[in-house]
Every structure is written in C-alpha cells, then in structure tokens.
Image (cartoon, grey):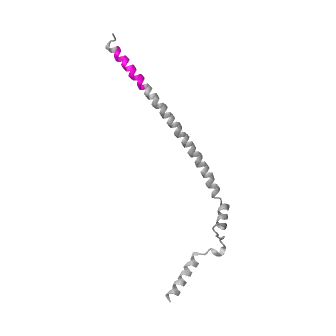
Amino acid sequence: MIKYPSFLVIFLILIVGISLYQIKFSINENEIALRTIKAKIDDAKSDIDILNAELSYLKRPERIEKIALNKLELKEILPTDIWNIKDLVEATKSINERVAK
C-alpha cells in the first residue's frame, strides 16, 4: 500500500506535469499568434512603402502642372497678375469713396 507522503508526492508530480503541459501549449499558441501578427505588420509596412512611392509619383510638379493646364484649363500666373497689398487697399478705398458719393 502507498503511504500518505508518497501519495502526496505522486499527486504533486502529476499536478506539476499537467500544469507544465498546459503552459507549453499556451506558449505555442501565443507564438503562432505572434508570428501571424508580425507577418501582417510586415505586409502593412510593404503596402505603406508602395503607397508612399505612388504618392510621390502623383505629386510630381510636372504632372500637376499638366493637369492644371489641360484638364482644369487654368493659365500660368503672369507678373501682372501679382498685386501688391497696398494697391488693393487703395483700390478698395477709391471704390468705397465712389459708392459713398
């Protein structure tokens, strides 16, 4: 017959063995989840790199200028189109004086 202390030792060994198996199993599951998350992060980083390259291609000044001239029918800015703020203030003063009279 197994004595009481021997039974306790066998029971503790069994509990520790089962606990270690459960810990190992959960660690394996967490490692698998970590690998899948890292793979998703790497995919997202490569997608971001591709999008940044496309954005820099689309932001080229030559391309934007061509679209502005051809599609939007804008014209280039001439030196006569640039006004001084003082001229605008004087122009509004003269317009206000004419309206007041």
Q: Position of residue 1 (x, y in %)?
A: 33, 10
Q: Give, as a single range, the part of the protein colored magenta.
A: 6-19
Foreground residue among 85 and 98: 98
Q: Position of residue 68 (x, y in %)?
A: 64, 66
**Image position of 11 with respect to 101: above or below:** above
User: At 54% from the left edge and 39% from the top edge, which residue is drawn?
Assistant: 38
Is 18 magenta? The answer is yes
Q: Is residue 10 left or right of residue 37?
A: left
Tell me which secondary structure the magenta stretch mostly adopts.
Answer: helix
Q: Position of residue 48 (x, y in %)?
A: 58, 49
In the displayed image of the protein, which residue is found farthest to the top? 1
User: At 44% from the left edge and 28% from the top edge, which residue is drawn?
Assistant: 23
**Image position of 92 with respect to 67: above or below:** below
Foreground residue among 23 and 92: 23
Is 88 magenta? The answer is no
Q: Position of residue 63 (x, y in %)?
A: 66, 61
